Image: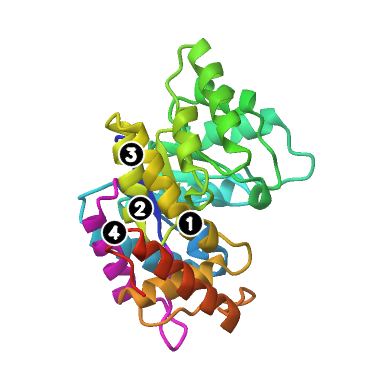
Amino acid sequence: MEFSGVFSVLPTPFDGSGKVDVDGLRRVVERFLKAGVNGFTALGVTSEVARLTEVERAQALDAVLKAAGGKVPVVAGTTADGLHTCLELSRQAKAAGAAALMISPPRAPKLNSDAVVAHYRAVADAVELPIVVQDYPPISGFAMEPSLLARIAKEVERARVVKLEDPPTPPKIAKIVALAAADGVPVRIFGGLGGVFLLEELLAGSAGAMTGFAYPEALVEIVSKYQGGDVEGAAQAFYRYVPLMRFEFQEGVGMAIRKDVLRRRGLIANSVVRAPASPLDKGTAAALERVLAWTKQQGAAWISV
């Protein structure tokens, strides 16, 4: 599969009774396909995966796969604290039809680089799918140096894609790319973090964005222009949209903002987030109105105010 462009990390919408809103998830996928995304990532951190039951995980992934209909690849998050559980989740994702897996390092006391490499090698040997190595220390509890990520790409052929969420991301991307190139190893790196450093990540050598954002139209425009050689056009688009990206990517309330925007877009029925996440407060809602209106004034016809 081609790892390039924009892969949208999907939310998991819930209906009024708290159940997974399958119809809403389908509408999100369909709208994002129209926006031109190159793929989807289901069961990621911003999918509230840690708050889903096993049944709900399967239900959400199935809904995404059916809605995508094979038009673009779907990456499934299968991170787990231990190898046994990770393998089980990965096999289930493959059986469901996922095109690739996204996996963070396992959680363990005194985790070391050799153990991390062994983890990815074991998954790659057991489940014949590409692996997106998720580098997000707040979740994994383990910071991976550029040399380790380059080593994983060298020693585990199926794990040559990285979802980088460890700022500052641009210099880390450049280091990984250089180290991998020195060994003759192809590596593809996607920036995360809501797209707030997307331009700088592209300039550093990233393959695009793999992140959650309620308006993937913006990400698609930036990446498409950059990859088409229009760096200046990509920069102008980035500076136009980055205030909205920054606003949505707020720790603690970002998921509530994203879901409220999707509700405004008519894609999901409500913006429910599961506890202990915080719902949208009145002040943040008012600020959202302002940044949406400003972004629309900049020429973003797809903005819903």
Question: Mark 4: which amino acid?
Answer: Phe
For marks 3 and 2, the one nearer the N-term is: 2
Residue hosting label 3: 233
Q: Nearer the viewer, residue 244 or 48?
A: 244
Q: Nearer the viewer, residue 270 or 112?
A: 270
Residues at marks 1 and 2 touching, judged by CB atoms closer than 8 Å: yes
For marks 1 and 4, the one nearer the N-term is: 4
1 relative to 20 in the view: left or right: left
Secondary-structure class at tag 2? helix
**Residue at 30% in and 51% down:** 97
**Labelled disc at residue 245:** 1
Q: Is residue 278 above or below residue 169?
A: below
Residue hosting label 4: 32
For marks 4 and 2, the one nearer the N-term is: 4
Secondary-structure class at tag 1? helix
Which quarter of the rendering shows the N terminus? top left
Question: Mark 3: which amino acid?
Answer: Gly
Question: Mark 1: which amino acid?
Answer: Met
Secondary-structure class at tag 4? helix
Secondary-structure class at tag 3? helix
Percent position of residue 87, x then y? 50, 46
The span shown in magenta is 11-38
Residue hosting label 2: 218
Spatial separation of the CA atoms under disc 3 and disc 1: 18 Å
Q: Is residue 274 above or below residue 69?
A: below
Spatial separation of the CA atoms under disc 3 and disc 2: 12 Å
Callout 2 crowding tier (Cα within 10 Å): few <14, some 14–19, many ≥20: many
